[in-house]
Amino acid sequence: MARRFRFPLHVHISTLFFLLVLAVGASIAWVSYSRSAHMLERAAGDLLVRISRQTVVETEILLSPVGTTVRLLGLQPLARATTLAERRQGLASLREALIASPSVTAFYVGYGDGDFFMLLRLADDGDRKLVDAPPGAAYLIQSIDGDEGRFIYLDADLNELRNVLRPDYPRGYDPRQRSWYAEALRHGEPVQTAPYLFASTRRLGVTVANRVAGSGAVVGADIRLTTLDETLRRQRITPGSRLVLFDDGQRVVAYSESGWLPEARPGAEGERPRVSDLGDGQLAALAAAPGGEGELPLTAFSTAGQRWHGAVARLPVQGGRPMRLGVMIPDDELLTDARQVRNRALLATLLVMLATLPLTYLTARLVSRPIRALADETAAIRSFDFTADVATRSVVREVDDLAADLASMKGAVRHFLDISATMARESNFDRLLPRLVDETVAVTGARAGVLYLADDDGAALELASLRRAGDTNLPRDAAPDGAAMAGLVASAARSGVGSVDVGADGVGRSCAGLAEALETTRLAYLAVPLLARDQTRIGLLVLWFDAEPQRDLVHFVEALSGAAALSVETQALIRAQKRLFESFIQMLAGAIDAKSPYTGGHCARVPVLTKMLARAACDATDGPFKDFQLGDDDWEAVHIAAWLHDCGKVATPESIVDKATKLELRYNRIHEIRMRFEVKKRDAEIACLQAIAAGADPAEARTELARAHARLDADFAFVAACNVGGEAMAATDVERLRQIGGQTWLRTLDDRLGLSEEERRRLGQGQPLPAVETLLADKPEHRQARGPDDRIAPDNRWGFRLNVPALRHNHGELANLSVGRGTLTDEDRYTINEHIVQTIRMLDALPFPRHLRAVPEIAGGHHEKMDGTGYPRGLTGGEMSPVARMMAIADIFEALTAADRPYKKGKTLSEAIAIMSRMRDEGHIDPDLFALFLQSGVFREYAEAHMSADHVDEVDLDAALARAG
């Protein structure tokens, strides 16, 4: 962001005065300049008209005598002479005509038979060099007599100096083909040609020609345009002015600057440059201007980076072609006087400013000093520095009023911020309400204050806090009724102010108890509604005074009520959200309880025991936990983590969680096994009867049947005992299971009938019937492979380090019955243990606020061990938080003593302590926390509350605290 430049007030006042004087002086200078420039432009326009008239006069003076001369020469014998000799006799007349007409370079006669006779003036060496004349030549005769052409050079006295025969001259020049000859024959009056390059001298000029009456001869005179160039130069308005004479085709006739005519081929016509070609194109804008007569206003334009004024005038030349005169005057020269006037005015303005600026600066300093002091006060307010009072005063009434208002505002802001800070610091909703009333009563000087909050339906106001000045409570029964107080403020009003007489009907009667407590009979009130963000009323704050408060105090409390409402609403929302989250936790525990009542009881008891142990650590005054403390936020994290420590069990199949026997899935498959043994017994009985029918000894056959039935009964009893999983399985037991399971029976029914599509796909192609099957089997369909989604990547972001079985489920009958201890296979055990993985994943996905960020770590660490052999991360004790280690102890103790497990009986208190002592010695649990668990009596307090009385026996604490080895 660009930095803004700021300056003191006295600099602004001085600058404003400076700019004002500058603006006035500049305006005066500009008006003077504009008027002078306008006058100069008008004068230049008038001068242009005069120049145009003068140019017309001089052009007519230049052309008119020549016209008369060619008329007179047409009356001379020369006009009718037929030979060179006769024509030379008229040389004296031609020389005199040339002397009388300085602008004429030559007089000549063109005859109807093609003859030509011309006397050319050689004015300087350039002319002589051009026609190859000898030194001293003053005139040149160019003659065509029949087929003979001659150039005769004469001196000033017409003496012949050289006579040169030019046979090529008649062939290259025919006067009858020239434009002046043709135009003269068509008119009876002298004519003037357009400017062209003379054939004799290759100089630009015009020809005035007149037809000789009664013959085909034409008398002509060549006039050089350099004469008009000199005329234009003399008429310049300023040294840098430019004048140009041009025809209707914008071809230049004369120009005030020299060297404008380019060299051209002899005899060529139409080679004159255009106006736009002159002066590097500067005259192009002038050529486009319309011509006029009379008063000609100048037009301003810019070309080649220079400003000009110019105009174009039409020249009605008498007896000649119409022409235009253009004038360009540079602004630097035209407006010189106007700019001098402007500069003098600006100089005078500057002198006035320099003379008054010091006085203005000092005056501005005096006026701005109090404002500077007020700016310092506002800077202090901006820095939240309210220590000093505002003591600034000023002779300027507005500044003095501002100082008084600033002092009042400073005090109000200080009180407002104090109250806002107090409310912001208080995070306990129940403590917030009385503090809010106390601070408001103190800052407003009220005698008492009552805070009402809307009920859950928003229909009624319920008393939240009643406080007297001095931060003391008043009896709750002294508070006026909320319904009566609701009418103190209109529905759309920001506040209500008034007074009540105690004992009167309505509000006065409701205030009787408060008035008695305050020992008064009349009370004034200021009632302000507390509005939520959606402008619904969430409460009402009523302040009680001895007299009605002033309007500034009312406005202050109105402003304060917004912050108070925001604080109350925010804390109420936080409390509601916590209640909602607590309900969600309870709902999740209820879902787990509905899924399996055993895990549900576990989820409810572990939080109790964890918090009991954490409280014992906080209460410790010596030992490892003498400095251990938990704040409100920490207790909330412990509470949530303890309740959610097994939330991942919602994803654990209840058939595994509640697996009471080894063959149990959704039902106990021992019934299928028993039915197979029943089939075997029927098969033995059928074999006995068949043997008797075949002639065998009945007594012997029945004895063999009894032995077979006894063997089958013993085998089934052994299988059933293995299914219970109460004792550890020895290798001999597993071998006997395999022998028993190897017995066969005959299946005659298709085992694919009545199955779902998924079961049929998993079963595969059935065996041909009848099929021989074993009593116990591990069939392919019993083994379900683990998919990629069921595996845990080694580099997972949670740091899980678990040995994942290759199979997701192994329902094999022999595999399950051969489980060494308990009822769970390796696959089942992993599925059970996986609940902590799901717990961590679920909690990690929740956007916990900052003070609850430890919940996933606390909840996910209760299966870790101090020696790093736990799961799912394999953390050591140093990598676990103290609360996570506490929860590990609580989880183990609750699991050992729980009497609602379907797969085991609950341990007695001494048995549980003995087992945990061994776990401590093996490096599984924290020894310091286990010692605190025992020494603080937490174990017994929990046992008396949550264990049956017959399981709460005596514990040898000395033996339990003594570590093995």
Image (cartoon, rainbow, N blue to C red):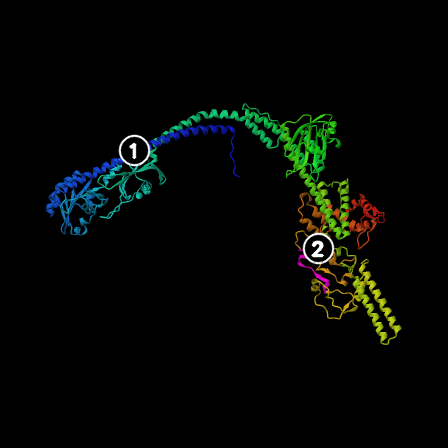
Circle 2 sits on which residue? 802
Q: Which residue is outermost to the front? A: 505
Percent across and percent down for residue 233 are 26, 37
Percent across and percent down for residue 647 are 72, 50
Q: Where 567 sits versus 848, above or below?
A: above
Q: Where 473 sits versus 691, above or below?
A: above
Q: Which residue is outermost to the top? A: 395
Q: Where 234 sits versus 959, above or below?
A: above
**Residue 529 in view (yes/no):** yes
Q: How many marks?
A: 2
- Sequence order check: which comes first, mark 2 or mark 1? 1
Question: CA gap, disc 2 to disc 1?
Answer: 110 Å
Q: Is residue 343 left or right of residue 142?
A: right
Circle 1 sits on which residue? 46
Q: Which numbered dot is residue 766?
A: none
Q: Is residue 782 magenta?
A: yes
**Extent of the magenta region:** 780-793
* Secondary structure found at label 2: loop
